[in-house]
Image (cartoon, grey):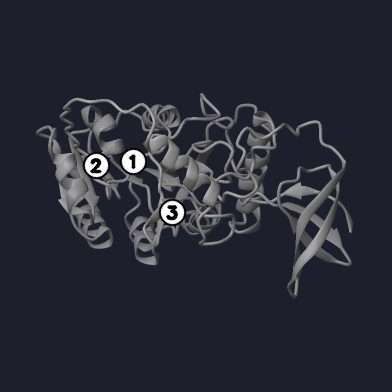
Amino acid sequence: MELQIQDVAFGGKGVARTDGKAVFVPYVIDGEIVSASITREHKKFLEAELETIVTRSPHRVEPRCPYFGRCGGCVYQHIEYEHQLALKWRQVKETLRRIGGLKEPPMRPFIPSPIEYRYRNRITIHVRDGVIGFFRRESNKLLDEVNAKLADLCGSNPHDGHYTLRVTDGPRVFTQGNDGVAAAMLDLVDRLIPPAGGTLIDAYCGAGFFAKRLRARFERVIGIDWDEYAITVAREDARDNETYVVADVEAELGARLRSIASASHEGNSAVIVDPPATGLTKKILEILIEYRPTQLIYVSCNPATFARDLAALEQSFGIDSITPLDMFPQTAEIEMVVKLTAQSSYKRLPAPPTVR
């Protein structure tokens, strides 16, 4: 079947249409004409596999990894980097329109990764029957070729000697996976929050990624997380104005914001939320809408739940800016940082030119 690829959807698959149905095809680029075979039929859409490229996009490049297309890690190695950013930017904007009802979201330019490959500072590997490796695309089976390469690497460049390693982070402590983009994210959040004094609450704080950067700008900094080990790490170099609490985020955030609301002398408040991909719970949304901290920073890795939550938060906040960041080049993942201001003091900043 010959298809005209109209766009690339969030997740990395190209979108075409035939007989009134959408067809999703991996490893293609918008504008290409391809030959594909249907692999699964659903009520409203079809899935297909790429066979040949009839008309090649000028944005197509040669993938660097020999396992690309079989390993489930990357989906965009065949697309030049600038076009990856343009696609992801459109995906965020379209998701905000479709799910969040935001017709003209205040999108800022994409913050790219300083490097396109070899940027990860950590990886997740999987174990099956005593063998470690990466999953095949869209399966829970290990990719044998990658396993063999890992075995080769384990046996290369052996050295004799004794070493002492002091590890302060544990495997359960969340860290951003790309140091360059993590630094850019911290700089961005630092710029977005004006000097306020008062109290900063870092919900889902982990080991204090945001709180540590901003602690000198607030009279009090409160970090909340359910993970006891992460909070232990955060407390190791805490200053006098920092408090880190092992607690349920819903209960603790509500209690802290109630306390701030009842003590007008505490001045402005700022809240940072960086929830898992499932987004904010209904209870946390209700708490934020009710108590309306002066400044709210929402960090997300899921455009769909992000858009859903922004639609709810618009009841009490103005959406000042939305900045996407490319934490994981070559993959479908997108990080987003949104600045919201309580409606009583809301004033949208002028939008700079955007990447399209």
Q: Are marks 2 and 1 in contact (CB under 8 Å)?
A: yes
Pointer 2 residue: 207
Could you tell whether 160 is left or right of 101 in the image? left
Q: Residue at x 27, y 31 (%)?
A: 214
Marks 1 and 3, the one that precedes in the sequence = 1
Name the residue nearer the viewer: 297 or 120.
Answer: 120
| Position of residue 148 measured from the top left corner of the image (x, y, whole percent) | 48, 45
Q: Residues within 10 Å of mark 3 (few under 14, many from 20)?
A: some
Could you tell whether 101 is left or right of 224 in the image? right
Where is residue 238, by image quadrant? Answer: top left
| Position of residue 122 measured from the top left corner of the image (x, y, whole percent) | 38, 39
Where is residue 42, by image quadrant? Answer: bottom right
Instruction: In the rendered structure, find residue 154 and report the number of the disc placed on it.
Output: none
Marks 2 and 3, the one that precedes in the sequence = 2
Q: Residue at x 36, y 26 (%)?
A: 157
Mark 2 vs mark 1, foreground winner is 1
Q: Amino acid at mark 1?
A: Thr
Pointer 1 residue: 175
Pointer 3 residue: 316
Under tag 2, what secondary structure?
loop
Q: Residue 273, can we see it? A: yes
Q: Amino acid at mark 2?
A: Ala
Quadrant position of the C terminus in the picture: top right
